[in-house]
Structure formats: C-alpha cells, structure tokens
Amino acid sequence: MSHFDVIVAGGSISGLVAAREAARAGITVAVLEEDAEIGTPEHCGGLVSMEGMKNLGIVPDASAVENSRIKRARILSPSNGFELSAEKQKVVVLDRRALDKQVALQAQRAGADIRVKCSVRSFSQEGKRFVVKTSEGDLTSDYFIDARGVASIIGRNRDGVLSSAQYEVFAPWIERDAIEVAFDSEKYPGFFAWMIPTGDGRGKVGVAGKGINAANTLKSYMDKKGPHSIVRKVYAPIWVMGPIDNFVSGRTVVVGDAAGQTKPTTAGGIYTCGMGGLLAGRAIAKAIAEKGDDDDDGLLGKYQKDWSSMFGEEFSKMLTARRLLERLDNKALDELFSAIPQDKLEEVSSTGDFDFHATALAKILDVKSASRMAKALLGNEIRRLVDG
Ligand SMILES: Cc1cc2nc3c(=O)[nH]c(=O)nc-3n(C[C@H](O)[C@H](O)[C@H](O)COP(=O)(O)OP(=O)(O)OC[C@H]3O[C@@H](n4cnc5c(N)ncnc54)[C@H](O)[C@@H]3O)c2cc1C
C-alpha cells in the first residue's frame, strides 16, 4: 500500500494549492481527484481579482484569462439600478479548466503526485495513520486534507445551500466590459442573477436562490434579455453560510468550499478557498518539520487562526449583509437602491476592494436615507455591518 505524508481529497483550487505548498516543503503529497480531468467540469464564473491571484502565487497563463477588460458592474434591483466602475479593482475572468491545470502543474513540479478518476470513498485513522479507501485501491497517509468542495459540507447542513445554474451563452446583449448582478427577492430569493462576460457577445450567465428551480429561473432571465444560444450548462450547489467551526480536527484538515471558505454574499471562492489551501499546506509542512506539534491548538490550528485573521471580520460582515438581503422584499430593494447617491458610488468605485466588498457595501449603506431605512428594517444587525 503506497504511503504519503499528506493525502489531499479533491483536485481543485484549494486542494491543489495546499498540495503545492506542502510539496514545496519537501514532503510527499498525493492529490486524489474523482473526475477524469483537473478543472473539468468547470462550475465557476471565474471572476477574481489579480491581487487575489498574486497572493495565491499564481500568475494566470494567457490561456486561462478569458477576459481582462472588465470596466463596469451594473447592479440592478427590480425597478432600479446603479453602475460601479470596476477598473480599480483589476478583476479578470478566468477559465477554471485552464487555471486549475496550471496550479496542478505547479503542484506536480513541486513533487505532488496527482491522480484523476480516483474517488475517495472513505478515510479513517488507525493509530497515527490514515487509511484512505479509493476507487483505485487503498492508500495511507499521516495527514488528510479534505478539499472535496460543497459535497463535503452538504452532509452537515443543507440550510446553507442554494441551487444554482450557470450557462455559457452566446448572445448579442453581453458586453465585454460589463458585469451584471440583478437582485429580485421573488425570482432569486437570497441571491441574484449574474452575467460575467468572457468576450463581446459571450459569457457565463447564472442564477442562484433558495428553493428555486434554477433551470426555469435562468431561462426566464435570459428570455427577457433577448436572443441567445446556450453552449454549455452547469448546475451546482452553492454554500453561503460562512466557515465551519473547526477547520482542523486532529490530523484532518478541511480547506476551501469544504470548510465554508466561500464568500456568503457572492459565493466567490477562488481566492478565499485558495488561501485556505495555501495556509493549510504550509501549516502541515511546518507540523511535519517540527515533528508532531500538530493538534488543533498547535501548528495546524495556526492555519485556522491565520485564515480567520485575514477573512474572519469580512466574512462576518458578509453574513450580516446576507441576512439583510434575505429580509428585503422587492419594494425595499428598490427603495434602498434609489437612496444611494452618486458620490458614494464614485467613492466605492475608486476605493473598493473586490476581495473585501462587504466593507464597500457598508459604505454604501452608511448613507442617511439608506441607513435609516435599513435600520428600520433590521434594527441592530445593520449597525453591526455599518459600524464594523
Ligand atoms: C455557479 C458557480 C459560479 C461561481 N463563480 C465564481 C466566481 O466567479 N468567482 C469565484 O471566486 N468563485 C466562484 N465560485 C466558487 C468557486 O468555484 C469555489 O469556491 C471554488 O472552486 C472552491 O474550490 P475548492 O477547491 O474548495 O472546491 P471545488 O472547486 O468544489 O473542488 C472540489 C473538488 O473535489 C472533487 N471531489 C469531490 N468529492 C471527491 C471525492 N470523494 N474524491 C475525490 N475528489 C472529490 C471534485 O470533483 C472537485 O474537483 C462559483 C461557484 C459556482 C457553483
């Protein structure tokens, strides 16, 4: 039976970055991916900031960049809307099929053994070793990283899961430089519809919401927009309840979507999940180097502390924003949108950080009329968001 220092279940962004970091420290790592190809099937809009990618140690290859010309974000309520400039935020649209392969190459070059079509069926600890049962036979390891995505978290709590559909679409109404986000509490309860352009006349168009029929909802969103052809369909669950309580239990370490490291507002997770992988991979490497100080309060626990100090406050603001969104009906959404003055939008456009957008949202809501209305609706919750 082959033995590794670390086995990673799941070969997507968080698992691959974790494997890369651990392998770079000279320890033996296997990444087990149940699908037949890394990055496929893609279930991601691919919208991410270049700053986030830099922090993950990835300069996306030209083949992974689908669109680097995003300049505007149109944010719509049922009868209102505003536009933010997105130029300062330097966001790009990436092709996850290419990006994940690029990170797999980084991990492989560092020494990781990546295996596709290898599904992890179970893992159990026997003494200090994990026995990992896979579709391709049993393996053992000293540490186990769970990077299996939403599938892993879903068993624990279905309440935080929304249904989503995202299609690749060719349509004349998609403009290369403009993202669109459309709120409607009846059509997309607790979430929104989105359009992420990959070029002129092409893009990724999606919807998510609590208890919706995602396929029907997306169809009516696109029918309303105008003529289009769908060239690819993806349905995937989205987790929006924030981080799980414990990223680490003994020598089992959970990263990425599996740990709830996806933004509760937008379900964006390339950066925050990738960072989970990066910190976890480094923590395990350190625990191995320092031989055994590896419990949840020790070196491995530092992974959770570091991730929380980077994102904890922002995620808790996002959770408040999510509760706000869940309570607003369409009339309230329209009123809120109309209360936001142009100078606030300009301020947020020039200073907002794509990866920490709850802070920008708080700025927008910290406008007298918007704030008064939101406070009337939500009492203290909104104060927590605005006052930090
Ligand atoms: C529709 C949609 C649009 C999105 N758009 C964006 C966006 O624009 N920007 C952004 O930043 N984020 C976006 N996200 C979120 C982003 O895709 C995820 O947060 C990110 O991919 C999480 O990475 P991960 O490695 O933790 O998990 P995943 O990417 O979910 O990967 C988990 C991997 O584990 C594998 N796996 C599962 N079970 C097993 C098993 N038993 N054995 C072996 N392998 C297994 C899976 O096949 C998969 O490859 C979007 C998500 C969805 C659903």
Image (cartoon, rainbow, N blue to C red):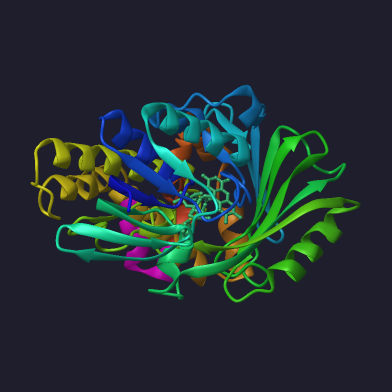
Nearer to the camera, 132 or 73: 132
Nearer to the camera, 137 or 44: 137
Nearer to the camera, 359 or 33: 33
Residue 277 percent across, percent down from the top left: 35, 43
Nearer to the camera, 25 or 351: 25
Dominant secondary-structure state across the stretch colored magenta = helix
**Residue at horizontal 63%, vertical 68%?**
330
Residue 372, quarter of the rendered image: bottom left
Residue 331, quarter of the rendered image: bottom right
**Residue at horizontal 62%, vertical 30%?**
64
Q: In the displayed structure, does residue 286 sit left or right of residue 255? A: left
Q: In the displayed structure, does residue 22 sit left or right of residue 362? A: left
Which residue reaches farthest front? 1
Residue 295 percent across, percent down from the top left: 12, 54
Q: Which residues, given as a range, are shown in magenta?
A: 373-388
| Residue 273 on the magenta segment | no
Q: In this rendering, does residue 273 appear at all?
A: no
Q: Is residue 59 above or below residue 226?
A: above
Q: In this rendering, does residue 21 appear at all?
A: yes
**Residue at horizontal 87%, vertical 41%?**
172
Q: In the displayed structure, does residue 236 sit left or right of residue 132? A: right
Residue 49 percent across, percent down from the top left: 50, 33
Q: Please tell me how many numbered marks the rendered image carries.
A: 0
Q: Is residue 333 above or below residue 205?
A: below
